């Protein structure tokens, strides 16, 4: 049995170095964004979270991950209970109830619940693994994933809820679930895109149950006539450019908010519609993506070295969800590309550890966390360059936000534990 100090010496130093580089770079970019946003307290808060997260990282790294898996059901149940508690007792800001105030810190329980979910799902697969080819096993694991996702969606936080999909897919694939079942999940993704493209954007669905059938009829009309144009009565709901901040919602001039059976919030519908066409509301829902593209473009090939003083990027989002726009402006194409390569290398490194794990449980943990990293990496950067709709999820180890930084450090601690306790380590 190795002592903790020797375990630390036998960490995967390639992964540690990549993680450290991303964290240090993140602190620098947060400082630049904080200066731009005239909020000097942002960097100090991130440094405090980093110190707490470092302790969590080392503790998980030197502790055998199998011990944490034994407690996985408690972690998962506890996470679900806290998510439910957030809806009842959480802080509400700008219409969303996502945070709990603990002492002088504000935490977002949805973030650490991802690690609890990876542990809980891995434990479930290990316990019921002999039934992995059964349809009921596929439905059960999918149902378990829907519990925290539904609670988070209720906050509402669509982006965070969607992250549970790739984590579930990765763990099911590693467990050996039949490919025909996994294909159903991919079909669901394609159907979701089609629904967003044709029903939400082109047919102008207002997000309510009562408008589903009419929106479906409008969609058929659009497809049959092979046109991108909306019916005249729907075009009338568009907001004229320059209407200002107090303009009505794109989704249905605010009327959907008063109806019963709202399935998707108006602002979420607006994000989908302006993803397909930012010019629908250039000064409202489409403002962030337009300014993000302008900010990244202003960086050119080598970057400007500073965040624009002309206010191209809204100050409230520069240091968190849109930190990559800041990176693009400061470091340009060269720095942005190196940053993307570093993030990708970190994910590949986690996959390498998964392949070297001594057992299935280690592989499940690593693949689940790799899926988490990839989802955040792809969606966060993708939304800043108009590849995916704006969903508001942070960039691993880089965006400002203590809860997500702790989540990333905890996940990397588990990955290091899998590496330290791999079979080959004890055979030499």
Image (tube, rainbow, N blue to C red):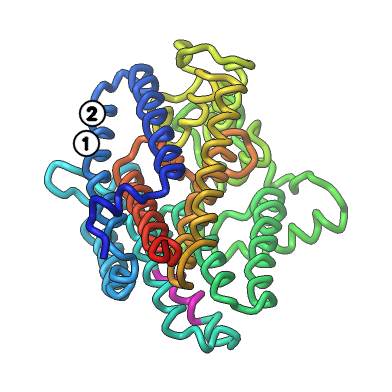
Is 382 rendered above or below residue 191? above
Q: Does residue 266 appear anywhere in the picture? A: no
In the rendering, at what x and y percent does residue 162 appear? 50, 57
Is 401 rendered above or below residue 374? above
Q: What segment is highlighted magenta in the picture? A: 140-147
In the rendered structure, the answer to whether residue 164 lies left or right of residue 289 reads left
In the rendering, at what x and y percent does residue 272 appear? 60, 46
Crowding near the residue tagged with mark 2, few <14, some 14–19, many ≥20 C-alpha atoms within 10 Å: few
Residue located 30% across and 49% down the image: 8
- Give yes or no for residue 46 being in the magenta stretch: no
> Where residue 224 is drawn, which disc sits there?
none
**Gap between marks 1 and 2, in whole Å?**
6 Å
Which quarter shows the N terminus? bottom left
Disc 1 target residue:
48
Residue located 41% across and 25% down the image: 29
In the rendered structure, the answer to whether residue 103 lies left or right of residue 26 reads left
Query: Is label 1 in contact with label 2 (beta carbons under 8 Å)?
Result: yes
């Amino acid at each position: 049995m190795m002592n903790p100090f020797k375990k630390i010496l036998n960490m995967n130093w390639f992964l540690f170095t990549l993680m450290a580089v991303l964290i240090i770079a993140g602190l620098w970019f947060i400082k630049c964004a904080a200066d731009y946003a005239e909020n000097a307290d942002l960097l100090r808060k991130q440094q405090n979270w980093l110190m707490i997260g470092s302790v969590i990282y080392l503790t998980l790294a030197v502790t055998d991950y199998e011990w944490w898996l034994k407690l996985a059901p408690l972690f998962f149940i506890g996470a679900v209970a806290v998510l439910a508690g957030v809806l009842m007792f959480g802080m509400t800001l700008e219409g969303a109830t996502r945070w709990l105030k603990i002492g002088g810190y504000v935490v977002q329980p949805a973030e650490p619940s991802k690690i609890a979910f990876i542990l809980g799902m891995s434990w479930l697969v290990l316990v019921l693994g002999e039934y992995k080819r059964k349809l009921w096993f596929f439905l059960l694991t999918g149902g378990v994933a829907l519990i925290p996702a539904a609670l988070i969606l209720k906050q509402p936080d669509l982006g965070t809820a969607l992250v549970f999909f790739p984590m579930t897919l990765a763990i099911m694939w590693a467990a050996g679930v039949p490919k025909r079942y996994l294909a159903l999940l991919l079909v669901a993704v394609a159907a979701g895109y089609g629904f967003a493209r044709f029903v939400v954007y082109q047919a102008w669905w207002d997000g309510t149950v009562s408008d589903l059938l009419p929106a479906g009829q409008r969609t058929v009309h659009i497809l049959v006539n092979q046109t991108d144009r909306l019916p005249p009565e729907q075009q009338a709901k568009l907001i004229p450019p320059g209407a200002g901040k107090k303009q009505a919602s794109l989704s249905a001039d605010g009327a959907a908010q008063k109806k019963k059976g709202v399935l998707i919030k108006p602002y979420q519908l607006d994000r989908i519609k302006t993803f397909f066409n930012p010019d629908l509301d250039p000064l409202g829902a489409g403002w962030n993506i337009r300014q993000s593209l302008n900010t990244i473009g202003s960086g050119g090939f080598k970057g400007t070295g500073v965040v624009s003083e002309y206010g191209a990027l809204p100050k409230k989002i520069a240091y968190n969800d849109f930190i990559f726009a800041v990176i693009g402006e400061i470091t340009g194409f060269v720095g942005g590309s190196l940053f993307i390569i570093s993030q990708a290398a970190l994910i590949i490194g986690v996959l390498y550890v998964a392949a070297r794990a001594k057992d299935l449980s280690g592989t499940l943990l690593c693949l689940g966390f790799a899926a988490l990293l990839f989802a955040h990496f792809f969606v966060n950067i993708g939304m800043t360059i108009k590849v995916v709709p704006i969903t508001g999820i942070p960039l691993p180890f880089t965006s400002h936000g203590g809860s997500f930084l702790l989540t990333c450090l905890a996940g990397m601690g588990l990955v290091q534990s899998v590496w330290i306790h791999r079979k080959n380590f004890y055979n030499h």
